[in-house]
Image (cartoon, rainbow, N blue to C red):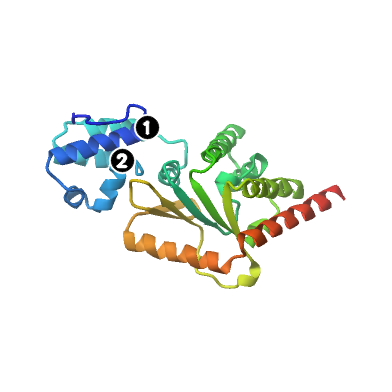
Amino acid sequence: MPDSGDVDPFSSPRTMLGSELRVARKRAGLSQDKLGEPLFVSGSFIGQLEAGTRRMTVELGRQIDTILGTDDFFTRNSGALAKSKYPNHFAPAAEAEALAREIREYAPLAIPGILQVEPYAREVFRAYQPTATDDVIDELVANRLARAKLLSDPTTPLLWCVLDETLLRRIVVSKTVMAQSLRHIASLIRSRRIIVQVLPFSAGAHPSMGGTLKLMSFDDAPPLAYVQGNAIGILLDDPATVARHSLTYDLLTASALSPHESLALIESVAERYEHDAAA
């Protein structure tokens, strides 16, 4: 077992495991790049493991134990951390999101999970899994709503979203629920907790027509990009790839309405839904 070194006793289990990895790697006289070579991962990936922004898999833990001579320490502890309350394709992103200093997200079709209200989230999950039991849906909804606790801190993480106008116009559940959803977003904007821009239909073609995009920055680890499709998601750490996605996001914000104009549109659409629901 590696010597613990200066590990914060109040750190998360994954952060503590990352700290142990840093101690063991340095004791072996290896740089992050050198440890990454036999594992076929980048030095940046090792840095993210050490910072706790990436989860160590059991197989990776087994290989690290072999390389660093740490018996089965990382195998055992990575196994203990393997379970997640999120779907497999999203779990790495959700875990990284919880540690991020800044999150920038483009959402083309649905309100981002962290901003969803309960009936909206429930309908999204039900549409995706129409034969799932109520207990399964209840658990998925509870986990999604729990992510919103990230916004309980008044300043961190910075959340900046570009929302496609499509998701404002698509009626999920009912016009009443859509009004509630948009008022919730507007409230977070007006409290200066989040930054939101709407990408209007008039913007035409744009650089992220292929799907969603999430960018995450950290205090002590390289940035990550997450791209997602239907039941599939990829967390990317290659610096050139992350930089390319960052440029994509910058181009999206350049094509989107200003934050002030976006808030006005969101509240206008919410008001129309409220009017129609009351009619």
Q: Position of residue 190 (x, y in %)?
A: 65, 48
Considering depth in this image, is 174 or 168 the residue closer to the camera?
168
* Disc 1 and disc 2 in contact, CB within 8 angstroms: no
Instruction: Identify residue type, mark 2.
Output: Thr
Above or below, comparing residue 79 to residue 237 in the picture = above
Considering depth in this image, is 131 or 225 the residue closer to the camera?
225
Above or below, comparing residue 141 to residue 170 in the picture = above
Instruction: Identify residue type, mark 1.
Output: Ser
The residue at which mark 2 appears reads as: 57
Q: Secondary structure at mark 1?
A: loop
Write the residue at 15% across / 41% down: 67
With 11 as the anchor, is 4 left or right in this view? left
For disc 2, the neighbor class at 10 Å (few under 14, some 14 to 19, many from 20) is some
- Residue 59 in sight from this viewpoint: yes
Write the residue at 87% across / 50% down: 279
What is the number of the mark on residue 101? Answer: none
Write the residue at 43% across / 51% down: 216
Most extreme residue toward the right is 279
For disc 1, the neighbor class at 10 Å (few under 14, some 14 to 19, many from 20) is few
What is the number of the mark on residue 12? Answer: 1
Q: Position of residue 172 (x, y in %)?
A: 68, 50
Above or below, comparing residue 254 to residue 25 in the picture = below
Sequence-earlier tag: 1 or 2: 1
Q: Secondary structure at mark 2?
A: loop
